[in-house]
Every structure is written in structure tokens, then in C-alpha cells.
Amino acid sequence: MPEEDLLVLLTSNDFNAPEVTFRGRNARSSHEATAVLGYRARRGGFAL
Amino acid sequence: MSDECRLDEAAPEDLRVAVRERYDAIARDPGIDANFPVGRKHALALGYPAEVLAPIPKGVVDCFAGPAAPVLSAEIRAGERVLDLGCGAGMDASIAAAATGITGTVVGVDASVEMVKTGRRRLGEGSVQVSMTAGHGAHLPFRDGAFDVVVANGLLNLESDREGVVREIARVLEVGGRLVGAEVILVEEVDRSAFTVSDWFR
């Protein structure tokens, strides 16, 4: 899924905008169009 | 349903079954060609320290297939209640249990019955205490606010009902509770029209 879709999915379900902790190569895949995004979000919109 | 079935023609339930069957097969034999990396070597490459993996039963680590190591940055504290959603055989859940200690609780949920069976059998042999159950993320058998932390390592990218799963995560998390995850994301446009179900795993 596109990163923007993930962010919308979270923020429309009571999570704050996630803190991105990791952005890197997708070790699971040979698909060059994908990456991995690590994130932390908090329910209720409080800052992490 | 065949792995070569076109992705845009597959029903959500078909995709759910395809994912479940793929992970069931890995649980039965972690050495199969899963179409993505699995196991201890993969975990080490992602940054899991060897000393963190050392206490976890080999059969659990062998089944690990997450795309990253978000549990390491979850800052889980003693006494916290943790849900590992899409737990596989329980590697991340075991790491969480080491952090919560005996005053906390760790529950793992996975769609693959075989993964849960493997985790229960192997973790029963080890020192960590994790309860595991088979189920789907869009229908979690927990009360509102039951957890302080939800870990989701590569959950949503293989999920056909992402909205339902995130809604359930929000429901079972305490207000102020945190979701710590990693997801495979698209970094450029791809033409999905030619994708098969097998591509769902890439």
C-alpha cells in the first residue's frame, strides 16, 4: 500500500500522525517498487 | 484458488485463505520456498541482536517472517499489556514478554492455525510466557482498552480488510496506548492489473 494510505488509515481511526522510526529496503521482497516503513502511533492523538 | 489467479479478480476471503495457507505451510516446514525470507538469518539481517534471539526456542525463530524489527523500538515496560497482532509463531511476542516481565501480559494472535500451534508447542518448552490464539485482526476477542501496546510487524500489507483491522486495534488499545509496526509500502506506482495472487506476497 502507498505510505499515504497507511497514514490516512491510522489518523482516521483515532491515532496521531505516526512517528516514522525506520524507512528502508524491503528485505522480504525482490520487488523494487516496495520498501518497509517502521512507525509508532498513539491512540487518542497524544504526542509520542 | 491458484497462486496464478489474477489479484484484481480474487475476493478478499480468497486472499485471506491464500495468506493463511502460505503461513501454515511455513509453520509446517520453515525451509520451504516462501517467496520471502524467513528465519534466524533473516531476523539477524533486520537488526535483531543475537543475544535477544538466544533465549527464544529455535522453532519459533525459524518461522519468523516479519519485514522489520519494530518491537525493538516499542519501549515496552514492565507490567504492560501487549498484543502482537500477526504474531506468527511468537518471536516478537517472546521479546515483548521479556520486557513486560511476569507483571505484564503478552497475547499473540495470528490467522495461521499452524503458526499458533507451533508457537504454543515451542514456547511451552521455553521460559517465556506468551498466550497465543488463532483469529482475524478485524474481529479481536478482547474488551475495549485491553492493551497498552499493539505490535504489528507486516500485518496490514497482507490484509484485505485494513480498515476493519485498524479500527479493531484502536478499540482494544487503551486511550494513549501505542501501536508500533512495520509495513511494506509502495514507493512507486505499479501496474497491479497483471499481478497474480502470488504477487500479494512480494
Image (tube, helix red, strand yellow):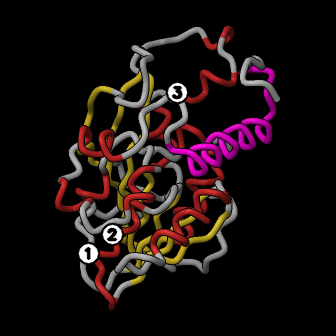
Query: Please, what secondary structure does the residue beneath circle 3 have?
Result: loop
Checking the image for residue B96, the label placed there is 2
Q: Are marks 2 and 1 on the same chain?
A: yes
Quadrant in the picture for residue B46: top left
Q: Chain of mark 1?
A: B
Query: Please, what secondary structure does the residue beneath circle 1 have?
Result: helix
Residue B114, position in %: x, y? Answer: 64, 57
Amino acid on which disc 1 is placed: Ala
Could you classify mark 3 by the number of other residues whose Cα lies within 10 Å: few (under 14), some (14-19), or many (20 or more)? Answer: some
- Horizontally, is B5 left or right of B181 in the view? right
Checking the image for residue B35, the label placed there is 3
Give the vertical position of B61 relative to A46 (above or below).
Answer: above
Residue B58, position in %: x, y? Answer: 38, 59
- State the separation of the CA atoms marked 3 and 2: 27 Å
User: At 76% across and 38% down in the image, what residue appears?
Assistant: B12
Residue B193, position in %: x, y? Answer: 68, 10
Which residue, as the protein is rendered here, is positioned at the far bottom?
Answer: B103
Amino acid on which disc 2 is placed: Ala
Residue interval drawn in magenta: B8-30
Query: Please, what secondary structure does the residue beneath circle 2 have?
Result: helix
Q: Nearer the viewer, mark 3 or mark 1?
A: 3
Quadrant in the picture for residue B10: top right
Q: Is residue A1 magenta?
A: no
Residue B198, position in %: x, y? Answer: 64, 23
Whether tag 2 and tag 1 are in contact, CB under 8 A, the answer is yes
Reading the image, the residue beneath label 1 is B99
Q: Chain of mark 2?
A: B
Residue A44 visible at all: no
